[in-house]
């Protein structure tokens, strides 16, 4: 069966360090993968999209990698700040359909 | 430009009652969808629509109905509420609709439903 796993439900790091979050998937061949941020009591907000033919994508202090051989995406937050504390969700389309399937998320806490 | 608006934000129901969660978007998005979010289970797709007059089931459709009579509105109906439907519900939309391309979602703020 198809599965998306975001390793570790919670990740605590010190301010200024780089946080690395993992998204692994099985039995998918996605054309792209997305990352969203969700703050408590709010809906998810889109951050980055990376396509299957792209190895890496950057947006300000965020970096996403996509390894279709390993079936894994890594999400990096460099020079982390307490304001980066949130839950981060990965999402990808199952098969040829356009609806998105989400992982259960990783809660990142950046300690001052 | 309000984006995706969900009402109500909070609702308490008794088992067996019915209700409708409203969702409206003002971005002229073709694609709209409903997810529920439960602790440890992430977001699960309930129903979705790729355009007015077209709806389809997602991963967990049982106990829910939808309709899409206009591009702007996509209400979610609970026919006979059950405690298992206690959850936070999110409506989301995107511009892809029936066209090809990545489905980047804009979410509403959520509706927290408790069924007693």
Image: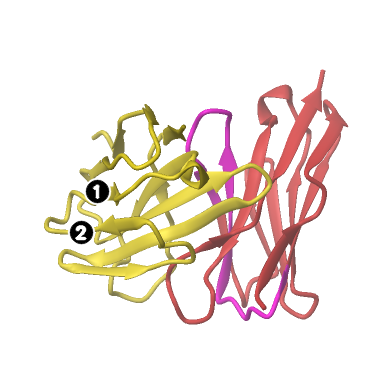
Chain colours: A red, B yellow
- What's the distance in space between the residues labelled 1 and 2, CA to CA? 7 Å
Using residue A23 as the reference point, say whether residue B16 is left or right of it. left
Q: Quadrant of residue A55?
A: bottom right
Q: Count the numbered circles shown.
A: 2
Q: Residues within 10 Å of mark 2 (few under 14, many from 20)?
A: some
Q: Quadrant of residue A80?
A: top right
Is A51 located above or below residue A78 in the figure? below
Q: Quadrant of the image for the N terminus of chain B?
A: top left
Q: Residues within 10 Å of mark 1 (few under 14, many from 20)?
A: many
Question: Which range is magenta?
Answer: A25-47
- A36 in the magenta segment: yes
Q: Name the chain under label 1.
A: B
Using residue A80 as the reference point, say whether residue B96 is left or right of it. left
Asked whether the beta carbons under mark 1 and mark 2 sit within 8 Å of each other, the answer is yes
Q: Which one is in front, A97 or A84?
A: A97
Residue B66 position within the rendered picture, expressed as x and y whole percent measured from the top left: 26, 57
Residue B11 position within the rendered picture, expressed as x and y whole percent measured from the top left: 37, 28
Mark seen at residue A11: none
Q: Which one is in front, A83 or B77?
A: B77
Q: Which residue is mark 2?
A: B67
Q: Which residue is mark 1?
A: B75
Using residue A107 as the reference point, say whether residue B64 is left or right of it. left
User: Is there one chain holding both mark 1 and mark 2?
Assistant: yes
Question: Among all residues in the image, which is located at the extreme left?
Answer: B69
């Amino acid at each position: 069966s198809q599965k998306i796993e975001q390793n570790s439900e919670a990740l605590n790091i010190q301010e200024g360090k780089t946080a690395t979050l993992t998204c692994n998937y099985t039995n998918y061949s996605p054309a792209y993968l997305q990352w969203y941020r969700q703050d408590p009591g709010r809906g998810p907000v889109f951050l980055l999209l990376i396509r299957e033919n792209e190895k890496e994508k950057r947006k300000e202090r965020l970096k996403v990698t996509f390894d279709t051989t390993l079936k894994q995406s890594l999400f990096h937050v460099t020079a982390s700040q307490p304001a980066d504390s949130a839950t981060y969700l990965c999402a990808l389309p199952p098969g040829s359909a356009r609806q998105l399937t989400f992982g259960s998320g990783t809660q990142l806490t950046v300690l001052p | 430009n309000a984006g995706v608006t969900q009402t109500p934000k909070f609702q308490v129901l008794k088992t067996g009652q019915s209700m409708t969660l409203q969702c409206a978007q003002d971005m002229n998005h073709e694609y709209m969808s409903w997810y529920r979010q439960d602790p440890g289970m992430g977001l699960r797709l309930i129903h979705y629509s790729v355009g007015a007059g077209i709806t389809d089931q997602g991963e967990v459709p049982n106990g829910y109905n939808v309709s899409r009579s206009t591009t702007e509105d996509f209400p979610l109906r609970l026919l006979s509420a059950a405690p298992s439907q206690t959850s936070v519900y999110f409506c989301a939309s995107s511009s892809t609709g029936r066209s090809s391309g990545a489905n980047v979602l804009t979410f509403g703020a959520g509706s927290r439903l408790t069924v007693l």
